[in-house]
Image (cartoon, rainbow, N blue to C red):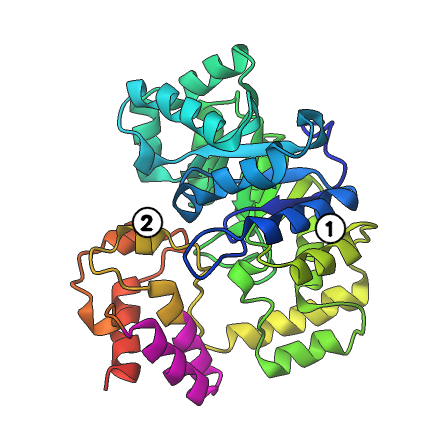
């Protein structure tokens, strides 16, 4: 099954993390240059969602991509997110607003976003899959897919219930491959069982596989073949059945680095796999918080606590960068949102794709920094 006949490469531009200006708007001038470099290198796949950057990702794509290139020059994926609809009647108006925001007449891929056991019932009751299939018949969607954050048995259930799903986007990276919380390997195997092509998200786990502990980073550096990100992304792209690997890129340096090793992609060799095994063992031996900075938790937090930023501070402290951790914590919480302000409502945990015990972790962060 070739679901990507028009994809020129197996590497895509994830648009959840874009270059931002100090006023909170997307730096579309910088983003346009990134788009030009990406397309100029032969890549053409872009991924967004209505909630990314509070809607600014979609409009930035209209400014920097869709208004500047002919429609056949790019593949655009968008998603239906659970917090933007309640019933069937909400879906079509939302979908039309997404087309307008992105400046296109159709989406190449439309994904049921962040599917898990609990929100799948919402999608079923609102006939979200059926509505998307109707939109496909109308030519407004080329391919129906899902993005997924749950256990392999839930994925198997969804794909059995809706065999019309053509593509599955899963979290997949070398640190999560055997992780029982994320179940990357098991979800990958379910996709293969159902003969579904795979899109990879979080190949560098929100940047945590770029900023490695010194001992682990030294192992990859000794290979002399590329950046830390390069090994993580090439790892994901080396598996059979993986059609596309996404990377969120926030500046031109990231774009250029990714282009350098994905333009003429080569799978990892034996020596590189052995090095990654050593890195995995080192990372697993350290109690770092496995946050990917997706910010789904902050969208739900009534206290406006910048949870991913505070977890990054805690990880910095764990890696012994004490001065930087304290400095950044105080910077992030200068106007409120300290870990101690958590009211333990649990809204963050229900939204967390990583299934992190956020309330308990915030208590640990508070014990460390709120002195």
Image mark for residue 238: 1
- Vertical placement of residue 13 versus 85, above or below: below
- Vertical placement of residue 268 versus 7, above or below: below
- Vertical placement of residue 322 versus 21, above or below: below
Q: Residue at x 61, y 54 (%)?
A: 30
Quadrant where the image shows the C terminus: bottom left
The picture places residue 299, in percent across and down from the top left corner, at 31, 51
Q: Nearer the viewer, mark 2 or mark 1?
A: 2
Which is nearer the eye, 134 or 64?
Answer: 64
CA distance for labels 2 and 1: 30 Å
Using residue 216 as the reference point, say whether residue 153 is left or right of it: left
Magenta segment boundaries in residue numbering: 312-334
Mark 2: secondary structure? helix
Q: Earlier in the sequence, mark 2 or mark 1?
A: 1
- The image quadrant that residue 75 belongs to is top right
Q: Residues within 10 Å of mark 1 (few under 14, many from 20)?
A: some
Labelled pair 2, 1 in contact (Cβ < 8 Å): no
């Amino acid at each position: 099954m070739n679901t990507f006949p028009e994809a020129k490469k197996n590497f895509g531009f994830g648009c959840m993390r874009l270059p931002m200006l100090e006023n909170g708007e997307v730096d579309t001038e910088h983003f346009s240059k990134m788009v030009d470099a990406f397309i100029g290198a032969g890549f053409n796949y872009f991924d967004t969602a209505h909630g990314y950057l509070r809607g600014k990702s979609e409009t930035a794509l209209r400014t920097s991509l869709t208004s500047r290139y002919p429609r056949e020059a790019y593949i655009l994926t968008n998603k239906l997110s659970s917090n933007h609809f309640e019933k069937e009647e909400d879906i079509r108006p939302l979908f039309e607003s997404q087309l307008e925001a992105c400046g296109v007449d159709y989406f190449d891929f439309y994904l049921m976003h962040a599917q898990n056991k609990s929100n799948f019932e919402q999608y079923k009751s609102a006939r979200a899959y059926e509505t998307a299939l109707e939109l496909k018949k109308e030519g407004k969607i080329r391919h129906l897919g899902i993005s997924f954050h749950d256990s392999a048995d839930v994925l198997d259930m969804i794909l059995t219930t809706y065999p019309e799903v053509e593509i599955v986007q899963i979290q997949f990276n070398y640190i999560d491959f055997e992780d029982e919380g994320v179940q990357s390997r098991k979800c990958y195997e379910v996709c293969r069982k159902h003969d579904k092509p795979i899109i990879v998200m979080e190949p560098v786990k929100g940047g945590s596989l770029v900023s490695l502990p010194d001992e682990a980073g030294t192992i990859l550096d000794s290979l002399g073949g590329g950046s830390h990100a390069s090994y993580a992304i090439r790892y994901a792209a080396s598996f059979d059945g993986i059609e596309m690997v996404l990377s969120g890129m926030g500046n031109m340096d990231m774009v250029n680095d990714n282009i350098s090793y994905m333009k003429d992609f080569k799978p990892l060799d034996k020596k590189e796999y052995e090095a990654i095994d050593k890195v995995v063992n080192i990372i697993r031996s350290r109690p770092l918080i496995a946050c990917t900075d997706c910010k789904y938790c902050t969208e739900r937090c009534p206290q406006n606590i910048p949870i991913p930023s505070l977890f990054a501070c805690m990880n910095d402290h764990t890696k012994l960068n004490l001065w930087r951790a304290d400095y950044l914590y105080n910077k992030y919480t200068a106007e409120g949102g300290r870990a101690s302000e958590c009211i333990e409502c649990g809204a963050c945990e229900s939204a967390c794709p990583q299934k992190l015990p956020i309330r308990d972790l915030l208590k640990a962060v508070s014990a460390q920094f709120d002195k």
